[in-house]
């Protein structure tokens, strides 16, 4: 198997190890879709959860809009996982 060019290795390394920070709080997070609000300093699993927390141009708490902890290594909130999805992951033996 041919080796990857150095630029490809660098791109893969950056994508898998990038740690993001906020200048307004001590939050740290990773993930290409993860979103952090510079207003309330809450981190979300993706743009749709972030957008949902903005209600009439103000920030709603995750609990107010039904978001749950994503059980990541850092505080992060997203949509609750459906029971049928949980049973799928249980069958794979990878659910946490």
Image: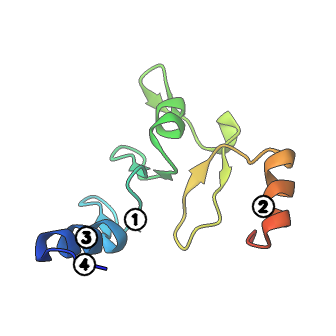
Q: Secondary structure at mark 1?
A: loop
Return the residue at label 1.
30
Verify CB contact (< 8 Å) between mark 3 and mark 1: no
Q: Earlier in the sequence, mark 3 or mark 4?
A: 4
Q: State the separation of the CA atoms marked 4 and 1.
A: 30 Å
Q: State the separation of the CA atoms marked 2 and 4.
A: 34 Å
Return the residue at label 4.
2
The correct choice, above or below, for 26 with respect to 35 in the image is below
Residue 1: x, y in percent?
A: 31, 80
Residue 44: x, y in percent?
A: 50, 49
Q: State the separation of the CA atoms marked 3 and 1.
A: 11 Å
The correct choice, above or below, for 16 with respect to 3 in the image is above
Q: Nearer the viewer, mark 3 or mark 1?
A: 3
Q: Quadrant of residue 9?
A: bottom left
Q: State the separation of the CA atoms marked 2 and 1.
A: 22 Å
Q: Secondary structure at mark 2?
A: helix
Return the residue at label 3.
14
Relative horizontal placement of residue 43, taking residue 22 as reference (left or right): right
Q: State the separation of the CA atoms marked 2 and 3.
A: 28 Å
Q: Earlier in the sequence, mark 4 or mark 1?
A: 4
Q: Earlier in the sequence, mark 2 or mark 1?
A: 1
Verify CB contact (< 8 Å) between mark 2 and mark 4: no
Q: Residue at x 59, y 42 (%)?
A: 61
Classify 10 Å Cα crowding around label 4: few (below 14), some (14-19), many (20 and above). few
Return the residue at label 2.
89
In this rendered view, identify the residue nearer to me: 36 or 12. Answer: 12
In this rendered view, identify the residue nearer to me: 85 or 75. Answer: 85
Q: Quadrant of residue 92?
A: bottom right
Classify 10 Å Cα crowding around label 2: few (below 14), some (14-19), many (20 and above). few
Q: Residue at x 82, y 55 (%)?
A: 88
Q: Earlier in the sequence, mark 2 or mark 4?
A: 4
């Amino acid at each position: 198997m041919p080796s990857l060019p150095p630029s490809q290795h660098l791109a893969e390394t950056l994508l898998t190890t990038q740690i993001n920070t906020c200048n307004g709080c001590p939050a740290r997070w990773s993930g290409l879709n993860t979103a952090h609000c510079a207003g309330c300093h809450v981190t979300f699993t993706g743009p749709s959860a972030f957008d949902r927390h903005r209600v009439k141009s103000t920030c709603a708490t995750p609990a107010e809009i039904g978001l749950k902890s994503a059980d990541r290594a850092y505080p992060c909130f997203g949509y609750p996982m459906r029971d049928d999805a949980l049973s799928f992951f249980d069958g794979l033996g990878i659910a946490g």
